[in-house]
Image (cartoon, grey):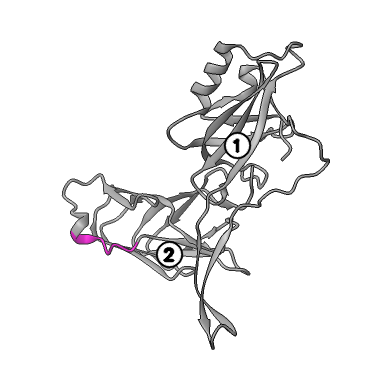
Amino acid sequence: MYASDFEYDGHYLSDFGFVVCDFDGASSYDVISAGSKITFNKVSRNRGKKYGLNGTSYDECITATFDICKDPCFDDDGTITSDEYRDLMRWLNRSRFLKFRMLNELDDSEDEFDRETCYFYASFNIEKIKMYDKLYGLRLTLETNAPFGFALPLSYTLSFDGSDAEGTLYDMSDEIGYTYPNMTINVMGDGDLTVYNDMTDCTFYISDCTNGEVITVNGETMVIETTSQDHDLGECFNFEFLSIGNTVDNRENHITASIPCEIEITYSPIIKETP
């Protein structure tokens, strides 16, 4: 890990006058976990001479340990006061997972998809590093809520006129497979809405849509809502949420819609990186 600073819950370590450091840096190299550890569930065949794969799962979230100390460019003494320690504990030792990313001097752009910009959702456990009863550093153990990181959110806006025209979306995730994005659908005609993705062979269907209606879908919580008070989605929705995905050789998702509408699709691509 090379970093001098990090961002957590919208604040920066440097705002507190601290930097990332290593109090045990005796070696010139580190061997660290790459995260995304897969558990292979196997079944014995022929008395253990061969094993068949019965499925896989991610059973561990990413964890990482690193140190912080006062920035020597601004503080020659380096001793951490009680007030400084309490401020850091209040900021970092949280009871929920919040957005976190490591930073170095080269991190200067968030305007578009960048494979180097990787976020995690995390919190910290903290230990004190003391010398002669004085506090000089903190050892942070980062705990995340996923086995991988995420890129900045990507949004695609696809417009359909109700004909056979299709829109194309490129899934930039490092994980081969599929995910459920967030969607905002601006309906521009009356009728039954069918949204189909050929990559995942997924059909999202809602009957009795009306012109001007706005339908929103939260892909993580699987909640769907509409601005039309007269539209009973419980009766009209087929409960197949639209998914997007990729294969080893193909990232293109070709999407079609049956009635005129504009669909904004937003998701955070998976990045298989560690802090």
Residue sitting at x 74%, y 11%: 77
Magenta highlight range: 235-240
Q: Main secondary structure of the magenta part?
A: loop
Q: Is residue 143 left or right of residue 222?
A: right
Please, which residue is most extreme toward the front here? 132
Asked whether residue 250 is drawn in magenta, I would say no
- Indicate the amino acid at tag 1: Arg
Return the disc, 2 or 1, that comes first in the chain's sequence.
1
Dot 2: what SS?
Answer: strand
The residue identified by callout 2 is: 256
Q: Is residue 154 left or right of residue 3?
A: left
The answer to which of 117 and 55 lies nearer the viewer is 55
Q: Position of residue 16 (x, y in %)?
A: 61, 18
Q: Residues within 10 Å of mark 1 (few under 14, many from 20)?
A: many
Q: Quadrant of residue 83?
A: top right
The residue identified by callout 1 is: 101
Q: Is residue 96 above or below residue 231?
A: above
Please, which residue is most extreme toward the left here? 230
Q: Is residue 100 above or below residue 158?
A: above
Q: Split into 4 quadrants, where in the image is the N terminus?
A: top right
Check residue 60 in the rendering and tell me which mark sits there, or answer none.
none
